[in-house]
Amino acid sequence: MDKQIYDVEEEDAGTRVDKWLADNVEFLTRSAIQKLCESGCVTLNDKILPKNYKLQGGESLLLTLPDAKPLDVEPQNIPLEIVYEDDDLLVVNKPKGMVVHPAPGNYDKTLVNALLYHCRGSLSGINGVLRPGIVHRIDKDTSGLLIVAKNDYAHNLLTEQIKAHSFTRVYNAVVYGGFSEEEGTIDLPIGRCPTDRKKMCVIYQNSRNAVTHYRVLERLGAFTNLELRLETGRTHQIRVHMAYKGHPVAGDPVYGPKNVITRLHGQCLHARLIGFIHPRTNQYMEFFSELPAYYMSFLKSISQ
């Protein structure tokens, strides 16, 4: 079992423990935290805390992560574009259309199925039986780079970098509309949409801070090609921020206009660069992915 201590600030007094942990443990959702609470895995001075415990401020919480259970998901020999690999981690260039981890309706042909085959069981277990090795994820129809941890040591140190906002993630996106400015920052909190639980939205209650920096690369008539740098990594962050600002990502079937660009088969969004400090060598590493064919083809079509 992996045990982790989290120190609560005085200013967080009155916050439910499940919400506070969900906001401060990057790799676990609130529902996962609640299940851990129900299993007695969240304690204070050896006392098991219920999920609705109100923090007093100043506590040191002990979070115990149980060992991963045997995984029912089968390894599958699916080709992977591996940009880098060593004994602790690998960097994968995920194609558009590939689901990262199994979920209802998608229990095979996922990145996890491919990783289980490629790594032969050598993946971290922190994120549970359905997400072994997954430190962070990108959406099914977003292409590009993501990092996978082969052991819990690497997973913990990489997660700490994400939490400290020292993990470099740069995306390219084609969005609707023009920009008068060359660059800017969107600093707006994101949470679950109260009217549609499948969507995220900019909201000031039950939300988490979210910061996206953007820079115009090319103005293309009704569209703009952007570079976006994530300071935080919330679910659907770029898609939500850009839609809120009136510049939804081209092809986005969830946050875009009703007359979605179907030939894109999802949002025109590519995780182009990833950078981090290697957990074993302590050296900064950075990896770059060329724009994929679908992205280049769309750029060409709107440039004419």
Image: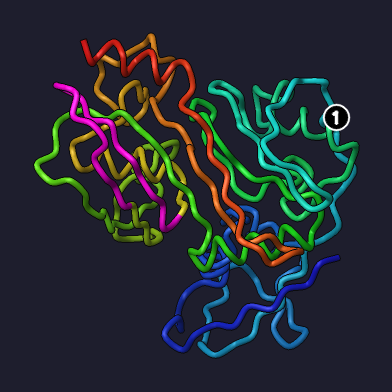
Which stretch is magenta? 213-232
Using residue 27 as the reference point, say whether residue 56 is left or right of it. left
The colour scheme used here is: rainbow
Amino acid beneath label 1:
Tyr
Query: Mostly what secondary structure, the magenta segment?
Result: strand
Q: Which residue is mark 1?
A: 117
Quarter of the figure with residue 80: top right
Q: Is residue 28 above or below residue 246?
A: below
The local secondary structure at tag 1 comes to helix
What x and y, as percent, mark residue 300?
Answer: 31, 13
What x and y, as percent, mark residue 40?
Answer: 76, 68
For the C terminus, the image quarter is: top left
Q: Is residue 264 above or below residue 165?
A: above
Q: Residues within 10 Å of mark 1 (few under 14, many from 20)?
A: some
Q: Is residue 281 above or below residue 103?
A: below
Quarter of the figure with residue 266: top left
Q: Is residue 235 above or below residue 67?
A: above
Can you name the residue that lies furthest to the left here?
180
The residue at the point 46 percent across, 27 percent down is 291
What x and y, as percent, mark residue 97?
Answer: 55, 21
Of 30 and 202, nearer the camera is 202
The residue at the point 67 percent across, 75 percent down is 49
Of 291 and 8, nearer the camera is 291
Q: Is residue 182 magenta?
A: no
